[in-house]
Amino acid sequence: MKSAMLEKEGFAALVLRLRAEGISDLDLLTAVEQTPRSKFVPPLFTAQAYSSHTIPIECGAFMEGADLAVRLLDRLHVKPGQRVMEIGTGSGFIAAILGRLAERVVSIDRYKTLLSAAQTRLDGFGIRNVVLRQADGSNGLVGEGTFDRILSTAAFPVMPRGIADQLVSGGILLAPLMTEDGGCVMVRLTKTGSRFDREDLFAVPYLPLTPKIASYL
């Protein structure tokens, strides 16, 4: 009962913070509520599950703060019936929420350890429309067709045009880009025909993408 109450209180506090910055999409917030974040964080950090702080996970990776995770999903504008690609599965938290919003989700990560744990969590929630794959995220998923939405949580040195080309017309790509001063900014590309409109959104804490799949983890 205590853990359920902490979950409820954590989610309520998160919603208040999100609404303060103008995020009130009911479908998105319902999907977040149906995906208890404490199930995705290491046990040591359960009390911080809904905080705005990053949380370390296995393989030297980390989960972005709860506020940032939902902010990204809000900016992605996922709609029912859409196909979504995620680059950087991590804990599987964002993939799980995407699975509640979209028709089909393909999420890739270079670490087999992370994918195995994420799959167990997805299975526990009965989410069947999310496919996890161990793959090199540098080039997206060539040969898998096009996607309505693409989200990367690993940073690129320049905008990944090859990945952007995997969008349908009207599609959206969110990807972090490294800046000259060593920082990182989340960028949104919207595709219209063969043209891309770029919008720089906000600073993010993501690390540079590491190519190739991990050999041991």
Image: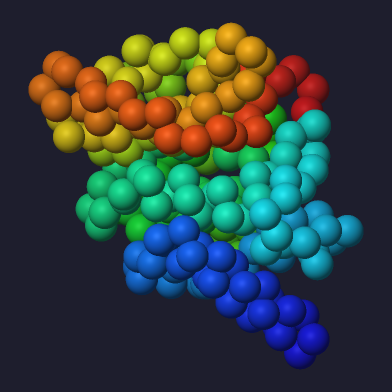
Q: Is residue 189 left or right of residue 195?
A: right
How was this image coloured? rainbow
In the rendered view of the protein, which quadrant contains the N terminus?
Answer: bottom right
Q: Residue furthest left?
A: 193
Q: Position of residue 157 (x, y in %)?
A: 54, 11
Numbered-mark total: 0
Name which residue lies at 48% across and 51% down: 71
Q: Position of residue 207 (x, y in %)?
A: 66, 25
Quick check: 121 above or below 56?
A: below
Quick check: 135 above or below 117?
A: above
Quick check: 89 above or below 70?
A: above
Res 200 visible:
yes
Name which residue lies at 26% across and 54% down: 79
Name which residue lies at 46% across and 67% down: 19
Res 133 visible:
no
Name which residue lies at 52% across and 27% down: 185
Quadrant of residue 26 within the rendered picture = bottom left
Q: Position of residue 93 (x, y in %)?
A: 58, 53
Q: Residue furthest right?
A: 44
In this view of the protein, which residue sits in the foreground, 116 or 105?
Answer: 105
Quick check: 134 above or below 13?
A: above
Q: Is residue 209 left or right of residue 6?
A: left
Quadrant of residue 17 within the rendered picture = bottom right
Q: Is residue 92 left or right of residue 174?
A: right
In the rendered view of the protein, which quadrant contains the C terminus?
Answer: top right
Q: Position of residue 145 (x, y in %)?
A: 26, 26
Quadrant of residue 213 within the rendered picture = top right
Q: Residue furthest bottom?
A: 1
